[in-house]
Amino acid sequence: MTYIADDENLDAVSFIPTRDITFVGFSIYAVYSTKDDFTCHWSLKIGDKQEPQIQTLLNHENDVKDHMCDIMFDEPYKVRAEEPIEIGVRFTVGEEFFCSTVFGYGGDDMAAR
């Protein structure tokens, strides 16, 4: 797995499966700086195919379990072995462009809060 950041201020990871997989979603750490609803802006690239950026509105009461949220795709993706997968995310709360998550932006000590 490789950590990358792109020019749209998305934090991203890239990984390459060693066998064919069905990719149905991923998990993110929740925004910790507020209990307000927050938006995850995410993008997905599989191999050479870039999907459009998507915005998912998340609610702490309904969507956050143990500091985590699941982003599930409408349809699963079939990914061939050795085909790279890149997932980029950033978060907003209202008009706030950048906000901290439980882990990552705020550091691993935030998970204990």
Image (tube, rainbow, N blue to C red):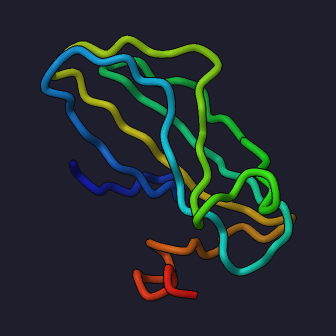
Pinpoint residue 43: horizontal percent, then vertical percent.
53, 37
Q: Residue at x 25, y 29 (%)?
A: 84
- The answer to which of 86 and 64 lies nearer the viewer is 64
Give the residue displayed 43% in from the left and 82% down from the top.
107
Specify whether 70 is left or right of 38: left
From this viewpoint, which residue is outermost toward the front?
66
Residue 70 is left or right of residue 96, and the answer is: left
**Which quarter shows the C terminus?**
bottom right
Q: Is residue 73 above or below residue 6?
A: above
Please give the name of the residue rendered at 41% of the width and 23% of the height, measured from the top-left corner.
23
From what the image shows, is residue 22 above or below residue 30?
A: above
Residue in the foreground of this view, choosing between 27 and 12: 27
Which residue is drawn at the image coordinates 53% and 24% (left, top)? 51
Q: x%, y% of residue 74?
A: 64, 19
| Relative to 109, residue 69 above or below | above
**Residue nearest the observer in this picture, 54 or 23:** 23
Tell me: 40 left or right of 101: right
How far from the left and from the top, in percent, is residue 61? Answer: 82, 60
In this view, the residue in front, 30 or 13, is: 30
Q: How many numbered tags mark residues here?
A: 0
Q: Quadrant of residue 35?
A: bottom right
Residue 26 pos. (x, y %): 48, 40
